[in-house]
Amino acid sequence: RLRKDLAVISRLLRLARRRLDTYLYVSLDNVISDFQGRIFDEADYLKEASNITRIGENIRKRQERVVVPEVFEELTSSEVLVMKYLPGIKITDVPALKSLGIDLKNLAWRLDLLFMRMLLRDKIFHADPHPGNISVADDGTIILYDYGMVGSLDEKTRFQLLKLYDGLSNSDPDVIMDS
């Protein structure tokens, strides 16, 4: 079904080509091609289960107050992903977080540190960190959901980001511009 829908979108784009500016057409064509490449990866639940396991292992090694859903591998297939239910408070529900005594500045710092460590140390990171994919348990533990989109960095890019972060941390414009 998804393949048919994407084929229809591609056909519509080809039909609209005559009415679109060339640059807009090329841009839309690139967006659709990129989307087609990613959507099938994101829809493969075996791949997502593997992502959950890899990221979860990295987080557990650091013993951070972060939890990743446990995957029930024996019940998981490319079409079905079964995980442990982890209830939490939506990260944007500030009144609920405050009512539990959650220190919001500390929470923000922990989230920043979590994603920087994934990006710069672990070489695999959660690439869809919007508020719907992050919640907080009653005890302040961060819960990450949805591992359909993950990313990784090559060593050169990772090193450049490390230099950039170092320059930003030390307010060093030369290092920032050089990275």
Image: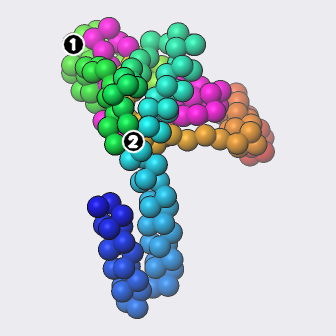
Instruction: Give the quadrant of the C terminus.
Output: top right
| Residue, disc 2 | 78
In the rendered image of this protein, does residue 56 appear above or below residue 37? Answer: above
Q: Nearer the viewer, residue 99 or 113?
A: 113
Residue 15: give x, y in percent of width and height: 36, 86
At 54% from the left edge and 34% from the top edge, which residue is drawn?
A: 125
Q: Quadrant of the N terminus?
A: bottom left
Query: Residue at label 1?
Result: 99
| Residue 127: numbered disc | none
- Residue found 42% across the figure and 44% down from its top: 44
Q: Is residue 146 above or below residue 16?
A: above
For residue 123: magenta? yes
The region drawn magenta spans 114-141
* Mark 1 closeness class: few <14, some 14–19, many ≥20 residues within 10 Å: few
Query: Where residue 16 appears, x then y in whole percent?
Result: 36, 85
Q: Amino acid at mark 1?
A: Ser
Q: Residue 123: x and y, percent?
A: 64, 33
Tell me if residue 31 can be seen: no
N-term mark: 1 or 2: 2
Q: Residue at left 47%, top 54%? A: 38
